[in-house]
Every structure is written in C-alpha cells, then in structure tokens.
Amino acid sequence: MEEEIDYQFEARVVEFFCDGVRMLGLPKSVGEIYGLLFISQSPLSLDDLVNRLGISKGSASQGLKMLRELGAVKEAEGDNLRRSYFQPDVELKRLARGFIKEQVRPHLASGDGKLADLKRIVREAPDSEGRQFYHERLDQLERWSKKARVALPLLQRFLGR
Amino acid sequence: MEEEIDYQFEARVVEFFCDGVRMLGLPKSVGEIYGLLFISQSPLSLDDLVNRLGISKGSASQGLKMLRELGAVKEAEGDNLRRSYFQPDVELKRLARGFIKEQVRPHLASGDGKLADLKRIVREAPDSEGRQFYHERLDQLERWSKKARVALPLLQRFLGR
DNA sequence: GTTATTGTTCATTTTAAATTGAACAATATT
DNA sequence: AATATTGTTCAATTTAAAATGAACAATAAC
C-alpha cells in the first residue's frame, strides 16, 4: 500500500521532468529517465529503467547515453556486478554547463559559420542597391551572436553560486 | 540577374533563421517569416510572405500571430491600404523579453504549480522510509526554480545593454 | 445589397522526431 | 567452446507537431 503511494508519487515526478526537458528541446524519454533517477533512493540499471518506466531498451540506452554526454548522470555501484548503475547529478551548475556545452554552443558555432558565409556573399557581390542594408543587418546578427557568447559564461557563473 | 543574387542571398538568410528558431523550439515557418522580414528593405504583407516563401496562407497567418505575440514584428505602412504590412523588431533586448515572457515564464509558472502539488503529496503522505529523501529532492527542485527566476531578469538586463 | 479583398480558424494531411524491437557485439559464466 | 547476460545500433514504426487549404468572418468597394 505504501509502495502504491510511492509509485504514484514517482510517476508524477517523472511527468514533471518530462515537461521540464521538453522546454529544453530534449526527448521525453530523457526526462523520464532523469526524473526516475532523480527521485530514486538508490542507483538504477538500464533494466530497472525499462521495467519501471515501461520504455524500450533502445530508448533507455539512447537516453542514458545523452544524459551521460550532458553530464547529468554518472555511474554508480549497484547490486549486480555485471550491470552498470546510474545516479543523477543534481547540481544545477553542472547540469547547466553540460547543456550549454552540448546543446547550445554547437548551434551558436554553426550559426557563426553560416553568418561568415553570408557576409562573404555580400562582400563579393556586385554593388547593388541593397548592399549597404544587407551589410547592416548582418552586422546586427553578429552583435547578437557576440552578446550571446558573453552572456553564457555569466549565466553559467551565476547558476554555479 | 542582380535580383537572382538577391533572391539566393535572401533564401540563405531565411534558412539561417530557420535554424535559429529551431534552437528556441519555435516552428520553422516562424523562422522563415521573421528571416524574410529581417532581410527585407521594406515591410511585407501576408501575401508577400506567402508568395516569396511558398508557404500557405494559414502558416503565414499563424506565424505572424506568434511573432506579434512575441513582440518580434510590428505593423507598418505599405503600398496597399487594405493590407497590413509588417516589419521586424531587431532589438535583441525586446526579442529576449518577448521570448522570456511568452515562452519561458509560463513554463516556469506551471512547473512551480506542479512542484507545490508534489510537496503537498509528500507532506500529507504517511511517514515512510523515503519521506525525508523525497523532501530533500523537492527542496532541491525549488532551489533550481528560484535560481531560474532570479537569473532571467539578470539575463534580460544584460541583453539590453 | 452584391461582389471582391483580406485575413483567421480549424479539421485534415504531411513532416520531422522519437520510440521500438530485433539483430548484433561484447563480455562473463558454465 | 557453448550459453547467458548486458548493452548498443539502426531500420522500421509510431507519435507529436507543424503545414495545408477550404470554409468562414470581417470589411471595403462597387
């Protein structure tokens, strides 16, 4: 009976994290996995996740992989020596760092590359009526990008306090 | 011929913004619309967007609606008095404010509500082995939420400088 | 009052992304 | 060496989100 309560509670926490990661643009299953680990008193194995969340082995494996890359979970000791067990990292600082490093920076970097391409196109194009205007707009974009690059470390530092 | 160059350039800028808004979790069409407005020298009407982007009237209408709600475009004067014309707001400050207000804060608020529900469940549950642990975890979540609520205005202020 | 123009809404269709599950590799156990 | 266990990969499927387009309202022009 008490387990029943725990189970319901657990399910709601998992749901809570589903919504959370959706806001960050990550797959629902990643939220489920992190959520269950977050509310578990002991580390869980891939099999535990499959059984308790009712998701496929494939999803669990891929989700754990992503969470490891983000630095959001780490390995831990568990009953069965053959298996890997996982527990969550619950420090906002490190979660933010991982997310920024893995999800935000790559996008910004690729954006910067494309922006440089666009500037080149304008530079090498024959003088046209719009050239000056285009140049200004691209400069604007560059200012945005620069600001973002400065903001990220500040944000990270703040979250780490 | 010169128009040909402009057209290709325009298309690449539009693509650039597609990628950009995808990172923010907004629909591609919103990026296309904002991108075309961003690189246009004069305000455009819904019909212009439909024709130049090759999207449906429905998409254009919905996309413009979202962009207006975000404060990312505003109405402007144009040739045809019967039509509404739009131009982009290119101030990062206001774009960020709109995005935070419309997309981030609502999620945080709903999260806070759900978190309060979870705390109540734990509080009202019979003493169990896990109760203390659950309480700690939920406190952790509350600290995250609080930190986010403080970080947002700081971020906003920084972007507005 | 009838017709034309502009823009919105929303049920249906399409598209992109996530999930599944079976095949596979890697490692341990007998 | 044969068998069992654990975890990964990826083609096929499912699901959720976005785009479409036809019907509709609102307004203007005739």
Image: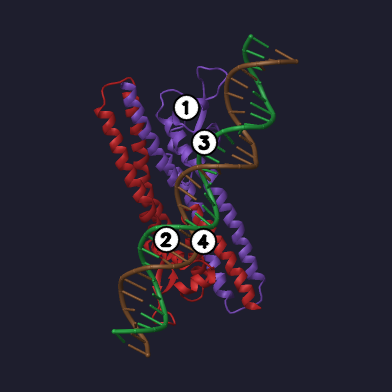
Chain colours: A purple, B red, C green, D brown
Separation of residues labelled 1 and 3 (CA atoms): 19 Å
Q: Nearer the viewer, residue B71 or B160?
A: B71
- Label 1 resides on the chain identified as A
Separation of residues labelled 4 and 1 (CA atoms): 49 Å
Separation of residues labelled 1 and 2 (CA atoms): 44 Å
Q: Nearer the viewer, mark 4 or mark 3?
A: 3
**Callout 3, which amino acid?**
Leu
Image coords of residue A148 (percent x, y): 49, 54
Q: Nearer the viewer, mark 4 or mark 2?
A: 2
Q: Please tell me which residue is depicted at 40% across the width and 42% down the height of the picture.
A: A19
Image coords of residue B146 (percent x, y): 34, 42
Image coords of residue B138 (percent x, y): 34, 33
- Residue A127 at least partly seen: no
Give the residue at mark 1. A51
Separation of residues labelled 4 and 3 (CA atoms): 32 Å
Give the residue at mark 2. B95
For the N terminus of chain B, the image quarter is: bottom right
Q: Please tell me which residue is depicted at 58% across the width and 52% down the height of the picture.
A: A109
| Structural crowding at the residue carrying mark 2, measured as other residues with C-alpha within 10 Å and reported as few (<14), some (14–19) or many (≥20) | many
Give the residue at mark 3. A67
Which of marks 1 and 4 precedes in the sequence? 1
Q: Tell me where residue B112 sits by quadrant.
A: top left
Instruction: Give the secondary structure at mark 4.
Output: helix
**Callout 1, which amino acid?**
Asn
